[in-house]
Each structure stands twice: as structure tokens, then as C-alpha cells.
Image (cartoon, rainbow, N blue to C red):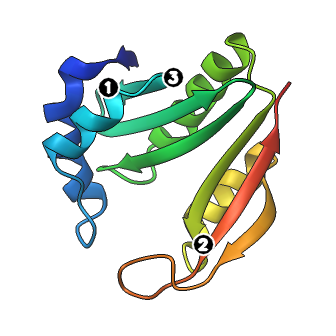
Amino acid sequence: MALAGPAFAPVFAALHPRAFPHEPWDEPSFATLFAQPGVRGFIDERGGFLLTRQVLDEAEILTIGVTAPRQGIATALLREGLAELRAHGVATVFLEVAADNAPARALYARFGFTQAGLRRRYYANGDDALTLRLEIG
């Protein structure tokens, strides 16, 4: 697992479409995100990535994805990312997840995330998103 900064935008852009083929983010999108204050990235060499953004004592998981499912990559990324956020004074973490993404929802539930809201037709394909929240500090 490696902490990843702006130089990793091409790596994130290469991995993202493999994890999210219907809504891939390109290299300029990642470069723009990495240029923002409080953005941190993580790369798992087995085929995974995590991008977070911190503002004061709150943070958001912008994206987390794996290219090789069922190998514990997402769990490792989430564990590492949450520890890093906690170490930087974050008390609350938010994320959006597709309402019909049962594996991701189960992962987040194992970490203690709870539903805080619903965003109807949030995704480009019209699917709803759940807003989840976790208190870590």
C-alpha cells in the first residue's frame, strides 16, 4: 500500500475504468482532484485505489475501487485510508454508494458506516445513491 499524490493521476486514471467501466474518470479529472487541498490517494499494488478529501474535521471518500475483487483489497484500502484520516484529525467520514451495490454496502457496514441520506438518480444511469457516514474521532 502506498500513499499517492498528484504524480499518480495517470495510475488512477488507468485503474478507474477497470473498476467502474460505466463511469470512468480520466487523468485530467484526477489531476484536478489531486490539486485540491486535503486530497489524499492510496494505491494497492494488487489492483486498487482510494481517494479521500479532508476539510477540517470531516472527510469524504471520493472513490474507492478494485480491479481484482474478493482479495481483501478494498478492506485494506479502507482500513489504511481511515487510519490516515484519523491521524489527521478527521472525526466524520462520508461517502456515496450505489443503492444496489450490495458488496460495497456490506464492506462499509463492516466498518460501521450508517445511512445518512439518499440521493435519487445520483448516477449517470439513473441509479440512486446512499449517503453513508462514519464517526472515527
**Which residue was labeled with disc 2?**
102
Question: Can you tell which quarter of the image residue 55 is in?
Answer: top right
Residue 127, given in percent of the width and then of the height, sits at: 49, 85
**How many badges with numbers are in the image?**
3
Name the residue located 82 percent from the left edge and 30 percent from the top edge: 136
**Which residue was labeled with disc 3?**
38
Residue type highlighted by circle 3: Gly
Query: Where residue 134 is drawn, which disc sits there?
Result: none
Q: Residues within 10 Å of mark 3 (few under 14, many from 20)?
A: some
Cα gap from disc 3 to disc 1, whole angstroms: 9 Å
**Which residue was labeled with disc 1?**
35
Name the residue located 19 percent from the left edge and 18 percent from the top edge: 7
Q: Residues within 10 Å of mark 1 (few under 14, many from 20)?
A: few
User: Circle 3 — which element?
Assistant: loop
Q: Nearer the viewer, mark 3 or mark 2?
A: 3
In the displayed structure, 137 sits above or below 10; it is above
Residue type highlighted by circle 1: Ala
Residue 101, given in percent of the width and then of the height, sits at: 54, 73
